[in-house]
Image (cartoon, rainbow, N blue to C red):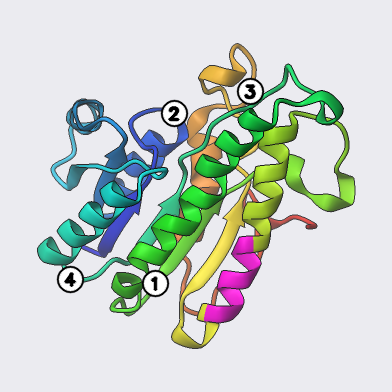
Amino acid sequence: MKGIALVTGANRGIGLEVCRQMACLDYRVLLTARDLEKAEAAAKNLDQNNIASLQMDVTDEASIERAAAEVETRYGHLDALVNNAGAYYDYWQKALDADLNTVREAADTNFYGPWRVTQAFAPLLKQSAHPRIVNVSSGAAALNSLGAGPPAYIASKVALNALTRMLAAELKDGGVLVNAVCPGWVATDPNNPGGRPIPEGAAGIVWAATLPDDGPTGGFFRDEQPLEW
């Protein structure tokens, strides 16, 4: 095995495809979801011997702590953390009249979720020889071109980009590479019927999760190419 990788929100869509691609690269992949049965079914459907299911809700600190303890017991380290879980593409709202409860819920999943998970798994990442963190973001959150759009989603992804930069700076001396990746407009459930094929969107995430030691950190990418913040 090349390493141990954990993917949040991985029972469908981009997260599921990231698990498949990482497994094909000979990683031991921990497929996590809020519902254990859904995680187990997704892992079974992939039909890969090196994928294991794990229950974890990124909005629930207790479940994150249990998952981290289980990974520590089983493996003693983590090589790649993919913060993929996301929610609330609130296309029906505008910033001026947005329901702030929805904004808070979006932030809890899209921003505080990756923050909680990274804090919990950082000690295990520091035990890796080649630690990587990937935060799945969106080009819609790029400040240089930001305009009107789904306010809860965009604001939470802007915050996630800021977190990416801070973590990259704090963890650089320890060799942890931290990057944000936009998969592009992908044909997952919220975006049907349009969008690019899911494997294409997932490929850039897998690239960032498997960077060489001299790879970039603190960057924002789509299809392995840098994006402006």
Whole-angstrom CA distance, mark 2 to mark 4, is 29 Å
Which badge, 3 or 2, comes first in the chain's sequence? 2
Which badge, 3 or 4, comes first in the chain's sequence? 4
Q: Position of residue 8 (x, y in %)?
A: 38, 44
Judging by the rendered image, the residue that carries numbered circle 4 is 76
Q: Are marks 2 and 4 in contact (CB under 8 Å)?
A: no
Look at discs 4 and 1 and give the one toward the viewer.
4
* Amino acid bearing label 3: Gly
Q: Which mark is residue 195?
A: 3
Picture quadrant where residue 161 is located: bottom right
Residue under the point 44% across and 67% down: 132
Q: Are marks 3 and 4 in contact (CB under 8 Å)?
A: no
Which badge, 2 or 4, comes first in the chain's sequence? 2
Q: What stretch of residues is rendered in magenta?
A: 163-170
Whole-angstrom CA distance, mark 2 to mark 1, is 24 Å
Look at discs 3 and 4 and give the one toward the viewer.
4
Residue 157 in the figure: left or right of residue 213: right
Residue 29 in the figure: left or right of residue 140: left
Look at discs 3 and 2 and give the one toward the viewer.
2
Judging by the rendered image, the residue that carries numbered circle 1 is 131
Whole-angstrom CA distance, mark 4 to mark 1, is 13 Å
Which badge, 2 or 1, comes first in the chain's sequence? 2
Residue under the point 78% across and 57% down: 229
Q: Are marks 2 and 1 in contact (CB under 8 Å)?
A: no
Residue under the point 43% across and 53% down: 82
Q: Does 132 appear above or below 196?
A: below
* Amino acid bearing label 2: Gly
- As helix, strand or loop, the secondary structure at mark 1 comes to loop
- As helix, strand or loop, the secondary structure at mark 4 comes to loop
